[in-house]
Image (cartoon, rainbow, N blue to C red):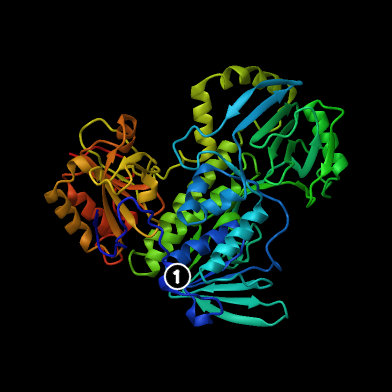
Amino acid sequence: METGRGTDGARDGERADDDASNAAGPDHGVGAGDVDVCVVGAGPVGLTLAIGLRRLALRVRIVDKAPATKHEARALVLWARAREALDALGVGETLARHGVELGVVTIHARGRQLGELTTGWARSAHARPLNIEQHDIERLLCEELARLGTRVEWNTEATDVKVHDDRAEFTLRHEDGTVESAAAPWIVGCEGTASVVRDRLGIPFEGRRRTGLQVVQGNAHPTWRLGEEPGRGHIFLAPHRSLLVFPLPGGGYRFFCFRDDPDPSLSAAPTLGELRDLVAETAGMPDLRLGPTEIPWLNRARFSDRVAATLRCGRGLLAGDAAHAWAPVGGHGMNVGILGAHNLAWKLAAVHHGQAAEELLDTYSDEQRQLAVRYIREMRFNFMELPLPPLGFRAFTATVPAALARRGFQRRLDLRLSDLGRNHTDSTLSWHRPGRHRRSGPRAGERMPDVTVTTCPTDPTRPAATRLHTLLGYERWTLVLHAARAHPGVLDELRDTCAWFPAPVRILPVTPWDGAGAGRLGHPDDLRLVRPDGYVGLVAPLARTALLRDYLAALAADGPGAVRESRPTRPHPAH
């Protein structure tokens, strides 16, 4: 293994998630002058961001006006890419132990089965979606953050924010009514759609209310002919109705019913009887009975599709529902927020530590806004979940059996649901300049595939094969190249190119385990510089290290060019 400046010296084949927090030390009880970042909002997004920042040795203060972690069920599913992000932050296994993986979803309409949708087609250690309730996610993330030395300050509400060139000033109101004036170099609003941070920064929340759609949902134990099978969910389709039924880790099911909205003035939570009638009608099961779960939860909601005009205003930033929100069609709102926190934490740490220019934070805003806008656009055409009128219902359900019978359709749908195919190819951080050969492997801006590789096949003391993602690290960049091209002279030149860069870079020669992995890894004559969040930043010919040098120079705080001005946005071959 070869490394650039600032490497952690991890051994080949070992997970590179050693706690940066050990060097940072605990920060609970810090004073106003001892905080690097104030995170407002301790939901899944704010907690993910705080964990990422702590692992990168930033001192974090996280506040929330709620008295404690929520006991409401709310979001349920973690899709594959969000699971990968949380695993990179060290909490993936913990969450998996408290959830249940969803393996199969049976599609029903008119009292018959139309087919089955299977999950887990993608190559990932976390290919299947994980059902775990939001309050459990928050509790587990709070516990992990406490282990890193930071505790949430509950009953603490941010009431005002002002940003300056070198700091953010904010006002906090505590449980006893006392008001505190504080400051930090950075503040991030993660407190939901009614964000005080967004409002005080003067950032418009653009979009409109979704009409004609409501979601009636709740947790319950059904008595029905389908039984209760862990890992199997159901979707029931009917005119003006779409019912999703997913298993809960502790037994029972979450029932989501997307339906029309004949009475928009009705805002009270549904009763268990109303949910039963709605489920029975949609599923065509008049004898259905629903019993309450140990912690009852019933909810009726309507939504708006909104995205903040920008996610950054100087020293203030937005993440999660404070930045973007839409109807929960597809169940990706929490996941997109978590991916945003995963995108932001390493960039904020790099800027704060002087490793990158402030323009790097603008790429977070651009990438995350584009991701949210794409979701809102796509979810408007998610006919598997959106309620359809009778004619549309008949046309759609007539095509479902043939579609589900095709492996290609199953793979494409699973890839879309998993978020593994989401990319930042249009980002100014994505430089794609491969050699003249036919393009293979991931483009710049795409997720680096989790292929099986070897790093030292001649050493019997090391694993013969490992997943590539276990060799990446959230605390560094990783320069991936084929070991067959990693001659001593090549490694020396790459080492010299990376040596001056202020952020850690690991030079990682690997050998694909099989032919399929070789194709997914890319052409042997190309190198790929992988960002800390697992997306490819640069694809360039191995022989043209000047492109690598230019890329790093554009990133560095004292480099000659700003990231935003550094390159054309469309991929093109090297000349």
Q: Is residue 383 visible?
A: no
Residue at 80% of width from left, 44% of height from top?
264
Residue 468 or residue 562, whichever sits in front: 468
Q: Amino acid at mark 1?
A: Leu
Residue located beneath label 1 in the image: 58
Q: Residue furthest left?
A: 489
Q: Is residue 558 left or right of residue 400?
A: left
Q: Is residue 177 left or right of residue 498?
A: right
Residue at 44% of width from left, 36% of height from top?
123
Question: What x and y, as percent, mark residue 419?
Answer: 50, 41
Residue 255 or residue 368, whichever sits in front: 255
Question: What x and y, as percent, mark residue 196?
Answer: 63, 66
Q: Quadrant of the C terminus?
A: top left
Q: Is residue 130 left or right of residue 155?
A: left
Q: Residue furthest front?
A: 460
Question: What x and y, as percent, mark residue 403?
Answer: 57, 20
Q: In the displayed structure, would residue 338 be above or below residue 225? A: below
